[in-house]
Image: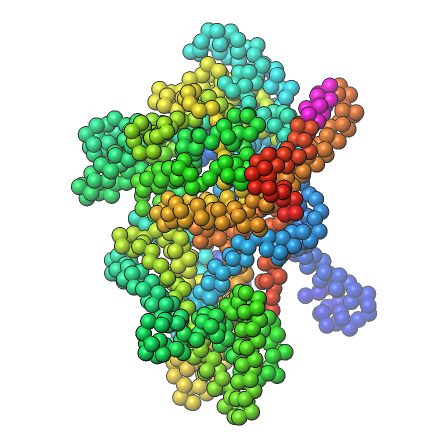
Amino acid sequence: MSGDYHPPAGWRWLLTWNGIGAVVVTVAVTISLWQVTKVRRSDYSDQRVVVRMLHWQLEAGYREALQLVIDDYNRMMAERHRRGEIPKPVVVMQVAVSEKIYGQVVNTNLLAREAPDLISMGDFALKSCGAQKAQHFLCLDELVRQPNPYNAPNHLAGADIDPAIAAALPTLAWRDTFIDGMRGAFDDDLQGFYAIPTNFFIPGRLSYNKDLLKAATGSEEPPRTFGQLLDICTKVKAYGERQGRRIVPIAGTRANLVYVEYYLLPFLASYRRSMDLNRDGMVSPMEGWAALGSGAFNFHDKPFRELAEASQALAEQFPPGFLALERDTGIYLYTQGEAAFHLSGSWDAGTLYHLTEGKFRMGIVPFPLPGPGERWGDPPKIAASEAGWVGGNLFGVYKYGHTAEAVDFLRFLTSWVQNQRCNRACDWGPNVIGTSLEERMQAFAPRLDGLQQLSFWAPIGPIAQQVGSIYRGQMQALLSGEASIDQVIEKVMDAYNDDAIGEPRIWAKAYDDQKTYLRTIERTLSVQALVARLSGADRQEADRRYRTLLSNQVMTTNAENLRLTWNQTIGATTGRSFPEAAR
Amino acid sequence: MSTVAGTPAIALRRGWWSRARFLALLWLMMLPTLAGLAVFTYYPNLEAVKYALFKWDGGAVEEYRGLHNFAQIFGGGDPRFWAAFSLIGVLLAANVLKMWPSIFVAIVLHRLKSERWQFFYRVMFVIPMVIPGLVALLLWKGFYDPNVGLFNKLLNWTGLMSVLDAFDRGMPQVAAFIATNLLHWNGDSPLWSLLLLPTQLITPLFGGAWGLAACAVVLLLLRDGLASVPQRWMLWILVLGLAAFAWGPEPLVLTIRATVLLGASAALVEWSHRRDPLEARDRLARLALWALGIGLTLVLLTKTWPVATGAFANGSPSWLGHSKLVVPAVILWGFPWIGTVGVLIYLAGLSNISKEVYEAAELDGIGFWGKIFRIEIPLILTQVRINLIFLTISTLSEYGFFLILLGPDGGPDNAGLTPGLFMYQKAFIENEMGYACALGMVMFVLLLFLTLIYQKHLKVEK
């Protein structure tokens, strides 16, 4: 530092570099403080009730569509306040947060007791355990048994609705106005409703560029079978080379790997009966592991090998290095006309239609399966039925916020008129009975015929732990062309047969988790018993919940059903004893 | 400063009451910061220590398990966690190389004669700090795009892609030749085998090229004589721990090999010191460096590129989508590796070197490079140590970088799975938060150990 420095006195100091810096910092801090207090004053004003609605849906169209409903509601509430029906006006505000940080935002807000009033039930840890969900979110059991007042005749006036449905809606219980009876929102652990579904998602559709198909193949007919899809892809590649343009057949990215699992059930359907031990129509994770351990399922067998080959053939149509590409890149490639096909679900349809408007004509078909006479077509492959799909985009009501106002808005949002309006505006699927999809979204209507199965086992998910991680890593290597099917199977089976991370650990953890879950249920039972004693008028409800939770606990047979499954399958065929020591 | 009784010195000379008031005032000023530190830094970390002993899923499941989590970690319950450290080893070695551009830039800036230009360049280096790390990460992800990324375009435009392709075809053949002819007995041609006998002894004697390198490091540590062993006990723990992987893994083979190699090294050292005490240190260091050079060269030629990837043939390799290219991509990230913080830290150290030292060096005839390696770098070892500690901490604990670039499984073939990412998997995918805390504690102890080694052995020789 140089010595003998004397800064100018008085206002002239502001003209020095230090002074300018200090002024800039002061102004910036002042503006920031003003912005923060402005938001705080707005959100926490005593003059009105502000209901905040948190979600992560940043897709094009959803926020605008939701805002249409919110604006209507806010106007209605302002009018009601003006007429003196409510003491303060209610204002709903939506807060959209990126999916990447959504979990952390919700967790932090819940722990800080400053959560928004309505929270989209995405992937955050504090909702994963039943007791935690009950701690933070309002139980809606009683509310969903009452009719939705916004389905009253005065709200349905002028709507293009089936008269029989219009007559039934005003008196139907809220839960019965949904196409799935709110099955998707039912919490099996807590035996109750803790969220409301607001629309209907259908995954697994293939969007295609009609104009590009016509140019490359001479026909804009979409592929109906897997073989036709591969054939078209070959022609599209050749077309691109003739034109000297970079054209990929399918705009696949790392985000599309999940669609490979769409083919799991059709290709592995022959295992359903042998793997579904309890005949509930689903192959649970532990049933899958039991089949693998007992030899009833083998990766080397024809079904899985065919699945792997078909997945490889599909991935070969993706752009080179697709594992490094994000979902946005896939959408970009497709909407810029550099890809003939795009794999996605109904949530992206609006975005795709919007971005391709004026560029090319778009069509949507289901994922094609191998047809008769084609490679992998024997035995015939049948797609899974979508009859069992349930409502999604669930919103829970934060227990310590403006619960009455939040519930009221949810009723408004899921009324017949608003539900159809909101979802049509963003090209999503409405989920109230009698509503219908936009014409161009008809391809997303659930297909009811097919194999009855909602889920099928694969070595993935939390129970699979490290074996699942290795499986996913190996599948990526397989689909990128780095590894062969035999190499993948070898590595996955090496992991599965490893005592440290494989079969013993998986079963021991599942057993341990069930025991822990039971202890959680017991704690919840204790709380319910206390609530039942103290609640007075709500005693009946508390008693009912106690009985259902107890029933739930009893049905898990103290986690011994796992031991029974082991003994009946792996134990019976291999003689190995249940791996308690691994715990 | 203090208004209690005039100047602080006066306050301290007055009675205990004045002293107490003065100290109380100081503590009061520090209290907000200490409270914030305690609540937002120490408390969460202590909670992590607590939850390491629990089965905890981040929610209501909270059951005391004692040392069960640690027993699982150290009892072979998670071999992938330990295997992930091999990637960390590569990244730490790369960090040592990646430090140098910042050092050289700092030296160049320091040597600028014009203070105005120095100031200008310092500001230019600081400005990029406003870019959030996530933005830089996503920019680089764009660079690595196989089809439209800048990186592949640059490689194609400069012709380096064809060089890489040639390496991709040639290096595996070199590796195979060395592995089958140099490092192992090949009885097809007796004369040929005799000529290669010295190299063919590497595998049986040292366990391979890595073993030779480990033995060279042992010799380097011993160069000052057996009496120096107690002073460097932390380095010995580290080196012998790593050497065990190279000399083993079978326990009996490891024991015999370690005994023979350590005994031979000790005997060589003692003999050299008794024979020629003055020159022994330099001779042993030269021998060790030669052996280290041979070992590392063999490792480089046999382990870095053993299999052809075929990724460069079409001119658009997928740097983040190919398991063999993920690690080079991670190492190359941030090129030319001139970090603002590093440059400023080194510059601060260089500014403490007085001009007389340079003048004396010039009088002694030391040139440009001599000043760098004999004056500047030795005198900024404190700053080098600080940066190395930061780099080590960030490398060992980093997971967000790999999560965003490669996904939660570490990409194809789990090539980018680091201990930090493994910890993330355990916490947020498998809901084993308590176990993840225990993993964090293990990594903390490792980091502490490495930091202590840097503190003890990487310092300016007064």
Nearer to us in this view, A38 or A153? A153
Location of residue B201 with respect to A481 vertically, above or below? below
Q: Can residue B2 be seen in this view?
A: yes
Q: Which residue lies furthest to the left in this view?
A: A242
Indicate the position of residue A203 as horizontal and vertical percent values: 42, 30
Prevailing secondary structure of the magenta residues: helix
Can residue A27 be seen here? no
Q: In this orientation, which residue lies closer to the viewer: A509 or A211?
A: A509
Span shown in magenta = A540-551
Q: How many marks?
A: 0
Residue drawn at the location 29% of the way across and 29% of the way down: A373
Asked if residue B95 lies in the magenta stretch, the reply is: no
Residue A57: give x, y in percent of width and height: 47, 33
Residue A534, located in which quarter of the rendered image? top right
Residue A336 in which image quadrant: top left
Is residue A543 inside the magenta stretch? yes
Left or right of B308, for residue B362: right
- Horizontal placement of B450 versus A365: left or right? right
Residue at horizontal 45%, vertical 19%? A420
Q: In which quarter of the image is residue B232?
A: bottom right
The percent position of residue A465, horizontal first and vertical second, equals 54, 44
Please name the colour scheme applied to the rendered image. Answer: rainbow
Which residue is depicted at the point 61% across and 36% down? Answer: A567
Write the residue at 44% across / 78% down: B291
Where residue A8 sits: x, y (%)? Answer: 52, 64
The residue lying toward the viewer, choosing from B75 and A13, is B75
